[in-house]
Image: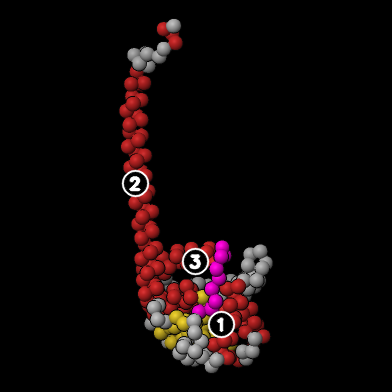
Amino acid sequence: MSGLFVSFNTYPFLNWLPLYHTMRKIFTKGLAKKIGGLFAIGFLLILTCNAVIESGAKGKTYSDLTAIPKNKVGLVLGTAKKLVGGQPNPYYSNRIHATVELYKANKIEFVLVSGDNGTIYYNEPSTIKKDLIANGIPPEKIFLDYAGFRTLDSMVRANVVFGLDTVTVISQKFHNERAIYIANQKGVNAIGYNAKDISGKQGLKVQLREYLARVKVFIDLLMKTEPKFYGNP
């Protein structure tokens, strides 16, 4: 029967098991605190960036067509016409509608379309231009920025390449706020006309990405990030 029992004297390393379990608990608890602290810092950073951008754009976005001041140029921020599954993108169609509203109400005289034209198979500016023309805006009133790969690029190039120091940005409110903040940091006096937003699951995903995009704004400003391309004025 004695052979069925394990002796601590026979196996000395077993004497260390209680200490091992104690150290493991201490280490695990300390690691959990560190991870929790990092999450708390990240969450606070996101909230701070969001609050600063909202404050910087306060009173500069409009949903009422009659209330928005007139500017010579409206800047449409590009997005894909179709979603990944091939369905129509409501963010796109709502921006088209908002742009046409502004133009027909004589709140803008010209339209600058800024979007991604990274390949020959993907051309946001030209696609948007076709739909604006189809909705009654004359082609000679529309100018295209083919290198608006990011909101930062669109706002900086609007000033440096297209010579705008005042502009009406056309996108959804959350996007307008970020664009206006960037523009103001770059010396452009911008206001925004809010295209209709999207609710539900799709809208939630975009809103969550927006929180991270707002953190990226301050990283870009800190790193003095420049647009991918400039060009002749």
User: Could you tell me which residue is drawn at 61 percent across and 89 percent down?
Assistant: 137
Task: Report x, y in % for residue 152.
Answer: 46, 74
Write down the residue under mark 3: 207
Q: Is residue 174 magenta-colored?
A: no
* Amino acid at dot 1: Ala
Q: Along the line of sight, which residue is nearer the eye, 192 or 16?
A: 192
Please tell me which residue is depicted at 44% across the width and 83% down the height of the picture.
Answer: 191
Q: Residue at x 59, y 75 (%)?
A: 92
The spot of residue 179 in percent (x, y) is: 45, 76
Of the pair 8 and 224, the residue shown nearer to us:
8
Question: With respect to residue 152, does 161 lie above or below?
Answer: below
Picture disc at residue 144: none
Mark 1, Cα crowd under 10 Å, few <14 / some 14-19 / many 20+, is many
Element at label 1: helix
Q: Are marks 1 and 3 in contact (CB under 8 Å)?
A: no
Residue 37 seen in the figure: yes
Tell me which residue sits at (43%, 78%) in the image: 180
